[in-house]
Amino acid sequence: MKMMKYFGMFILMGMMSAVMFAKTLYVGTNAEFAPFEYLEKGKITGFDIELMNALAKEMKMDIKIENMAFDGLLPALQMKKVDVVIAGMTETPERKKAVNFTKPYFKAKQVIITKKGKDIKDFQELSGKKVGVMLGFTGDAVVSDIKGAKVQRFDATYSAVMALENGKVDAVVADSEPAKKYIASYKDLSIASAKAEEEDYAIAVRKNDKVLLENLNKAMEKVKANGTYDALLKKYFK
Ligand code: ARG
């Protein structure tokens, strides 16, 4: 009987320490990118955040979200301020030199937002125009490569869209899903018909965190197989 008691206590302590010492995964994001990550009543939420929570649950980890400027995310990852970055981040050859990416979890495209009735059929037509982009986003690189385009950099998609509404720029290049979200409240803005190359969003980890990368990929397979991922797609993109 006494043995049983000790045994019980042992188990209880084990359970307590598992809860208390569940490893915390520090997650970097930039919560100005609805529907992937945004603030709702002061709390960070969105597709990426819920996906990250589901992945962490599979890995039996807790997460702590750190919100910061987009162009500070990869430096923060490398300086070990965070362990992973999930931010609707496109895996690009340039970024792959610095960090590793998980298997992609979402396909996206750059689109051009214009005033209604001023369609743009090709990105090259942005030449000679004032074009708003977000600092360090892939759209920044796309527009910076167009000869003659006058690039104007903004901190966040909503401020670039506001500049377009106020006539300060002629067009804004942004990721497809956020573009739809951020123009929803403007009746005179629309998405042009120009087509861009497809991009893959993936989660970034440090180059030497091989085990974490593998665990994230395994967890991703699980949440795709058990319906969690599809439920999130439905919730945010229906
Ligand atoms: N997909 C684009 C990129 O990788 C934009 C991502 C912006 N994400 C954000 N959370 N602000 O550059």
Image (cartoon, rainbow, N blue to C red):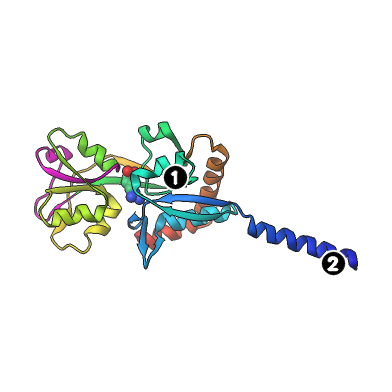
Question: Would residue 101 be seen by someone viewing this image from the given angle?
Answer: no
Q: Which residues are magenta?
A: 113-137
**As drawn, is 29 to the left or to the right of 132?**
right
**As drawn, is 57 to the left or to the right of 81?**
right
Q: Badge 2, how many Cα within 10 Å: few under 14, some, many 20+? A: few
What amino acid is labelled 2 in the image? Lys
Q: Is residue 115 magenta?
A: yes
Looking at the picture, how far across and down is residue 162, in whole percent? 18, 57
Looking at the picture, how far across and down is residue 179, in whole percent? 25, 53
Looking at the picture, how far across and down is residue 132, in whole percent? 18, 47
Q: Is residue 180 magenta?
A: no
**Picture residue at 49% right of the left edge, 38% below the top:** 206
Element assignment for label 1: loop
Question: Would residue 165 be seen by someone viewing this image from the given angle?
Answer: yes
Total residue callouts: 2
**Picture residue at 12% right of the left edge, 39% below the top:** 125
The answer to whether the beta carbon of the residue marked 1 is less than 8 Å from any atom of ligand 1 is no
**As drawn, is 165 to the left or to the right of 45?**
left
Q: Which residue is mark 2?
A: 5
Q: Looking at the rendering, which quadrant does residue 137 occupy?
A: top left
What amino acid is labelled 1 in the image? Ile
Front residue of this view, candidates 152 and 181? 152
Q: Which residue is mark 1?
A: 203
The answer to whether the beta carbon of the residue marked 2 is less than 8 Å from any atom of ligand 1 is no
Any mark on residue 75, and which?
none
**Picture residue at 53% right of the left edge, 46% below the top:** 216
**Picture residue at 45% right of the left edge, 38% below the top:** 78
Q: Badge 1, how many Cα within 10 Å: few under 14, some, many 20+? A: many
Front residue of this view, candidates 153 and 187? 153
**As drawn, is 3 to the left or to the right of 189?**
right
